[in-house]
Image: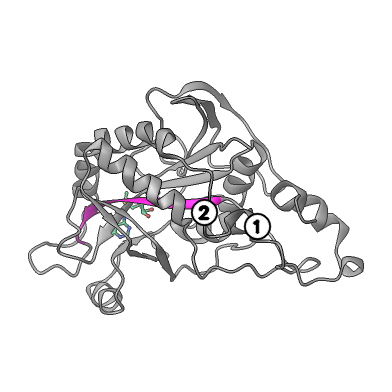
């Protein structure tokens, strides 16, 4: 099966230059995604682009329709999903303007729907390695080719927001060993794994969060300025990605549901099973 690349564009990335295609409205059993999806071709590969916050930045981190976003990409045939996200940094060496291809998450979000499964069909997928190793390698190679300074590996702390962290929280997350902070990659990564999609994140550092003694509080103006200054790198990275995509996977993303469903076939809720066909049709 040829790979189909879904790209979820975060803050500052609401379109993709050079992606020839059409915006398509998609509906899912979990409602509409954040926006229409740009379905087109880039570098000979089918690419599906979805602006996470919607064009014009309409959705806040807590109310982004994460389930619909992942279901919509899956229903259009995505096999891989790359998140492009703005983050704050907890490390001096991960400076504003740098890209971090993260490999782990700590999830501090609260109350966001975080699973396609539930009463009537219970499933437990592994999230020990939430990032697809092969896809992350491709992201790092593409970002380097684009001319970005790239850090391979890093722990992304997903906070609830929408306010930025307090100084005490920032110091605590840093002491925990986290590397970058954002508000959106959870539950997105959980849902991508449940939908058996290869998922990776290119985190673009926009600021030093609030722990840094030489920098003041996080200001949105600083973040937007850094995003604008590095937009060309994000665009060039996305353009370079198709050539680096490798359909192989050592993480087991595409078979994540093989032994995950606990509910006996005769005890399953037919209505939930019907909805699940969109994301888990291989096993339900
Ligand atoms: C514009 S700063 C805060 C905002 O940016 C990040 O979103 P995304 O991952 O979609 O780029 C961060 O998580 C916040 O939602
Ligand atoms: N410092 C920060 N905290 C949370 N999300 C962010 N996105 C960009 N910078 C951030």
User: Horizontal and vertical percent for residue 96?
Assistant: 18, 52
The quarter of the picture where residue 238 lies is top left
Rendered residue at 63%/43% (across/down)? 74
Where is mark 1, residue-wise? 255
Gap between marks 2 and 1 measured at Cα: 29 Å
Q: Position of residue 214 (x, y in %)?
A: 7, 64
Q: Nearer the viewer, residue 109 or 40?
A: 40
Range covered by the magenta-colored residues: 198-208
Picture disc at residue 143: none
For ligand 2, the image quadrant comes to: bottom left
Most extreme residue toward the right is: 266
In the depicted structure, whether residue 96 falls above or below residue 15? below
**Left-right relation of 268 to 252:** right
Quadrant showing the N terminus: top right
Tell me: is circle 2 under 8 Å from ligand 1.
Answer: no
Mark 2: give few (<14), some (14-19) or many (20+) Cα within 10 Å.
few
Residue at 81% x, 56% y is: 273
Q: Which-is-in-front pick, marks 2 and 1?
A: 1
The secondary structure type at the circle numbered 1 is helix
Point 78% across, 66% down: residue: 121
Closer-to-camera residue (268/164):
268
Residue at the extreme left:
214
Q: Which residue is disc 2 drawn over? A: 63
Compared with 169, 56 (above or below) is above
Would you say residue 103 sits in the magenta stretch?
Answer: no
Q: Is residue 208 left or right of residue 126?
A: left
């Amino acid at each position: 099966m040829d790979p189909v690349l879904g790209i979820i564009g975060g803050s500052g990335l609401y379109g993709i230059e050079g992606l020839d295609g059409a915006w398509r409205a998609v509906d899912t059993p979990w409602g509409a995604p954040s926006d229409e999806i740009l379905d087109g071709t880039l570098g000979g590969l089918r690419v599906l682009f979805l602006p996470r916050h919607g064009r014009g930045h309409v959705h806040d981190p807590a109310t982004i329709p994460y389930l619909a976003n992942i279901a919509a990409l899956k229903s259009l045939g995505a096999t891989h999903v790359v998140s492009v996200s703005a983050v704050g940094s907890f490390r001096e060496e991960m400076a504003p303007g740098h890209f971090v291809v993260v490999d782990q998450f700590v999830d501090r979000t609260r109350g966001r729907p975080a699973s396609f499964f539930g009463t009537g069909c219970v499933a437990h997928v592994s999230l020990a390695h939430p990032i697809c190793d092969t896809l992350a390698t491709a992201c790092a190679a593409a970002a380097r080719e684009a001319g970005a300074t790239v850090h391979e590996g890093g722990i992304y702390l997903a906070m609830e927001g929408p306010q930025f962290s307090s100084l005490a929280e920032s110091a605590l997350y840093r002491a925990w060993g986290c590397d970058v902070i954002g508000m959106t990659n959870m539950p997105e990564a959980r849902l991508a794994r449940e939908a058996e999609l290869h998922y990776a994140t290119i985190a673009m550092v926009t600021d030093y969060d609030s722990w840094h003694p030489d920098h003041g509080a996080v200001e949105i103006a600083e973040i937007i300025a850094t995003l604008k200054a590095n937009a060309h790198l994000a665009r060039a990275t996305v353009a370079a990605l198709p050539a680096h995509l490798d359909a192989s996977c050592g993480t087991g993303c595409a078979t994540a549901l093989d032994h995950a469903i606990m509910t006996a076939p005769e005890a399953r809720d037919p209505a939930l099973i019907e909805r699940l066909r969109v994301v888990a049709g291989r096993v339900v």
